Image (spheres, coloured by chain):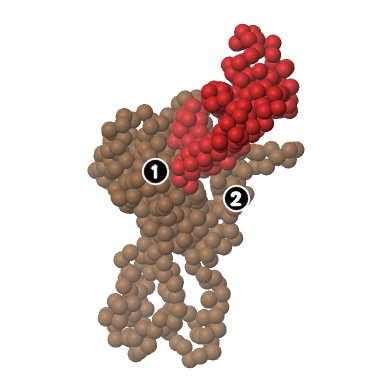
Chain colours: A red, B brown
């Protein structure tokens, strides 16, 4: 049956492409999670009536986030070519996609983090202050744990956007399922490959969504 | 007298876990405290040149309608709000001039409970109570021991592993109280602590606060808009209006002789409308053949609460209770009773004389103008 309907498909290549997609998604997700939370915290803490209320820093971070969120991802990759080249030493392959993926997704996630933090009950923060908590204690023992379900569902949404980004990055040489579908499928008129790659990506998206929902539900004791 | 003070100090020191040589050291002194907010161009004075002294070991209530500035006031005490001017001294620490680090340490000695409990939903009951101990840097084994003591103290034994969402409002406030007491504070600030609870739960929480006050010798400052709360547990009360204290004193004193209109309104909350009642009563006495009606005024009665039965036993008369309301405060009973004495006029006169001379109940013969 495989030879009949999927004559062009090479399972080893499909496996390699799927692995690369996972590799790019997971590594960029880790980077996005860390940088996104840092930026989101900065946005939240420096906002008006925040613990570190600071108009200038808030304006700078907000501007950075807005600018990088505004640039379409495919253009962002091209724009970041010199930076990637400097950082990774090449502009091809899964590793070269990481800086662009992280810089593309982190600002988006930062906004989700900010929204999540704003949902934390102000009274609980006040109670922690009344107990004599330091700002670091408030961040790590109140703000982050209390917003964790929102942070997890936010990173799930971001992960799915990132899977889409890896496919786009694949088209300009980053590897992964996007790369496989475009070069080996579309350009060689092997539509069976395009089809199989689509299915593989859908399955990956479902896996991420399922894991994200499961963790967010588990964490939520409200 | 001195022994009493000394014993009290010892008890306090024992419960606080260390020895206080100066008993008077944890009085709260508030001196011309002012807090202004600016909303755009407008300036709003939430607390206006407020001075107050709160004694060690007492339950001090501050009552006022919403917008009176009491919420801001209680937040100025532990500097959750920074005052515009004036000073707050708790014990030997001047809260208003402390550095950030010293303020954090000082706050560990000031417990606070809130209207909406403000528990961390992500933590269990025991972890919520352990939170202030974590902040204070208490070691794990000692923390567990202390948490168990507190859980038992507030009556939540068996619910240690529950999450706040699984608790009722009253239980949540108990967690709040346990959390506030974790670091053995000298002062407990209550921010409308019972306003989100139903009347029955309110009473159980108030009872808990009184027992803690007695057991630990803790000074409690509470703000509320419910006179019922003041009546039930406070020793002294201050009435706040437009950022200032318009009247203050012993709860009974304020109850029996309210001066300001706002205070009278609050007293009405608990006692009903006494002016109206009296007018009604006078009407009744004039219309019917009612004689020998007395108005008995109980103010802080603890010895003469059984007055009615005493009269019936001592004198050959019948007593007919016409109308009245007696309520209990921390300093004894308070209220007014209208009674009619029936029987031989000679016996009645003796009874009246007895009330007047032998008891501390204030009495007034209601004149029959017929």
Q: Is residue B205 above or below residue B358?
A: above
Q: Is residue B301 visible?
A: yes
Local SS, label 2? loop
Local SS, label 1? loop
Q: Is residue B80 visible?
A: no
Residue B320, percent from left and from top: 39, 84
| Residue closer to the observer: B50 or B150 | B150
Q: Which picture quadrant has residue B35?
A: top right
Q: Viewed as shown, does residue B9 lie left or right of B289?
A: left
Q: Which chain letter matches label 2?
A: B
Residue at x 40% of width, y 81% of height: B321
Sequence-wise, the earlier of marks 1 and 2 is 2
Residue at x 59% of width, y 60% of height: B261
Q: Dot 1 corresponds to which residue? A: B124
| Residue closer to the observer: B311 or B75 | B75
Residue A75, percent from left and from top: 74, 22
Mark 2 residue crowding within 10 angstroms, few (<14) / some (14–19) / many (20+): many
Q: Is residue B96 above or below residue A75?
A: below
Mark 1 residue crowding within 10 angstroms, few (<14) / some (14–19) / many (20+): many
Q: Viewed as shown, does residue B234 lie left or right of B86?
A: left
Q: Residue furthest bottom?
A: B289
Q: Dot 2 corresponds to which residue? A: B68
Contact check, label 1 and label 2, Cβ < 8 Å: no
């Amino acid at each position: 049956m495989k030879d009949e309907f999927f004559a062009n498909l090479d399972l080893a290549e499909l496996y390699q492409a799927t692995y690369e997609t996972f590799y790019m998604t997971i590594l960029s997700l880790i980077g996005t999670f860390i940088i996104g939370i840092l930026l989101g915290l900065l946005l939240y803490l420096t906002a008006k009536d925040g613990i570190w209320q600071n108009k200038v820093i808030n304006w700078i971070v907000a501007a950075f986030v807005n600018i990088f969120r505004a640039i379409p991802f495919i253009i962002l990759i091209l724009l970041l070519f010199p930076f990637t080249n400097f950082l990774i030493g090449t502009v091809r392959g899964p590793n070269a996609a990481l800086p662009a993926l992280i810089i593309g997704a982190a600002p988006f996630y930062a906004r989700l983090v900010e929204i999540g933090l704003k949902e934390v009950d102000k009274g609980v923060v006040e109670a922690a202050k009344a107990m004599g908590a330091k700002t670091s204690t408030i961040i790590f023992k109140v703000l982050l744990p209390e917003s964790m379900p929102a942070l997890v569902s936010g990173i799930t949404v971001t992960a799915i956007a990132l899977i889409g980004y890896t496919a786009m990055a694949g088209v300009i040489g980053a590897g992964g399922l996007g790369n496989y579908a475009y070069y080996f499928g579309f350009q060689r008129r092997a539509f069976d490959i395009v089809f199989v790659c689509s299915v593989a990506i859908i399955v990956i998206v479902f896996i991420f969504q399922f894991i994200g929902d499961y963790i967010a539900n588990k964490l939520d004791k409200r | 007298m001195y022994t009493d003070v000394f014993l009290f100090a010892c008890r306090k020191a024992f419960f606080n876990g260390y020895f206080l040589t100066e008993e008077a050291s944890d009085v709260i002194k508030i001196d011309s405290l002012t807090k202004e907010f600016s909303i755009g161009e407008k300036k709003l004075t939430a607390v206006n040149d407020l001075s107050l002294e709160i004694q060690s070991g007492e339950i001090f209530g501050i009552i006022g309608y919403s917008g009176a500035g009491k919420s801001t006031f209680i937040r100025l005490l532990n500097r959750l709000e920074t005052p515009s001017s004036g000073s707050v001294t708790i014990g030997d620490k001047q809260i208003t001039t402390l550095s950030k680090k010293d303020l954090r340490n000082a706050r560990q000695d000031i417990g606070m409970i809130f209207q909406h409990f403000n528990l961390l939903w992500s933590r269990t009951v025991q972890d919520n109570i352990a939170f202030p101990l974590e902040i204070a840097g208490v070691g794990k084994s000692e923390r567990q021991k202390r948490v168990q003591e507190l859980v038992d103290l507030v009556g939540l034994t068996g619910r240690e592993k529950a999450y706040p969402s699984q608790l009722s409002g009253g239980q949540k406030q108990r967690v709040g109280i346990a959390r506030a007491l974790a670091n053995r504070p000298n002062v407990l600030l209550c921010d409308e602590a019972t306003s989100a609870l139903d009347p029955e739960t309110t009473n159980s929480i108030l009872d808990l606060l009184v027992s803690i006050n007695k057991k630990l010798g803790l000074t409690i400052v509470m703000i509320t808009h419910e006179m019922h709360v003041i009546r039930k547990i406070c020793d002294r009360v201050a009435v706040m209006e437009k950022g200032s204290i318009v009247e203050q004193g012993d709860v009974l004193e304020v109850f029996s002789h309210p001066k300001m209109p706002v205070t009278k309104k609050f007293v009405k909350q608990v006692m009903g409308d006494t002016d109206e009642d009296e007018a009604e009563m006078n009407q009744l006495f004039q219309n019917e053949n009612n004689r020998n009606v007395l108005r008995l005024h109980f103010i802080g009665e603890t010895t003469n609460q059984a007055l009615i039965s005493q009269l019936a036993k001592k004198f050959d008369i019948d007593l007919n209770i016409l109308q009245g309301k007696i309520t209990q405060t921390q300093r004894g009973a308070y209220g007014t009773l209208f009674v009619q004495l029936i029987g031989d006029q000679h016996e009645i006169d003796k009874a009246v004389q007895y009330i007047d001379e032998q008891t501390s109940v204030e009495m007034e013969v209601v004149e029959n103008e017929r």
